[in-house]
């Protein structure tokens, strides 16, 4: 079988398919990079959240040691002790 020359239209179709293929491969690469960046951000956010929870726990323990059981009214900045159980209240 002899070599045959493709028509200009056929060559153009092949080139267009190759360009579209490269574009899709490039897009998939960009998506993979973005996905990796999002995973890294997510991991950092979860680590930050864990650290915040640990700080909250430590502050809660420190305030309980200093003031006892109760709550803090953030609008006034006052510590509000938990009501004493009846047994303790009657013992006083």
Image (cartoon, rainbow, N blue to C red):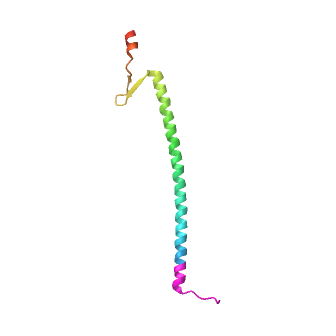
Q: Is residue 51 above or below residue 68?
A: below
From the viewer's perspective, tell me whether residue 49 is left or right of residue 75: right
Q: Residue at 34%, 31% (x, y): give it.
A: 75
**Would you identify the image quadrant in which residue 69 lies?**
top left
Q: Which residues are magenta?
A: 1-14
**27 in magenta:** no
Q: Residue furthest right?
A: 1
Q: Position of residue 78 (x, y in %)?
A: 37, 25
The x, y position of residue 50, in whole percent, is 51, 38
Judged from this view, the residue extending furthest toward the left is 75
Res 13 visible: yes
Residue at (39% x, 17% y) in the render: 85
Q: Is residue 48 left or right of residue 91?
A: right
Most foreground residue, 55 or 16: 16
Quadrant of residue 21 within the rendered picture? bottom right
- Can you say whether 21 is above or below 37 in the image? below
Q: Is residue 46 above or below residue 16?
A: above
Residue 4 in magenta? yes
**Residue depicted at x 40% and y 9%:** 91
Q: Is residue 74 above or below residue 16?
A: above
- Quadrant of the rendering where the N terminus is positioned: bottom right
Q: Please say whether residue 92 is visible from this viewpoint.
A: no
Picture coordinates of residue 45 (x, y %)?
50, 45
Residue 19 x %, y %: 53, 74
Name the residue: 59% across, 88% down: 5
């Amino acid at each position: 079988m002899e070599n045959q020359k493709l028509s200009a239209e056929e060559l153009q179709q092949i080139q267009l398919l190759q360009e579209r293929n490269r574009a899709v491969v490039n897009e998939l690469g960009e998506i993979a990079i973005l996905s990796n960046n999002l995973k890294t951000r997510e991991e950092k956010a979860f680590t930050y959240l864990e650290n915040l929870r640990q700080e909250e726990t430590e502050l809660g323990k420190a305030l309980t040691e200093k003031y006892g059981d109760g709550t803090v009214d953030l609008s006034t900045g006052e510590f509000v002790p938990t009501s004493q159980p009846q047994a303790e209240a009657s013992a006083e």
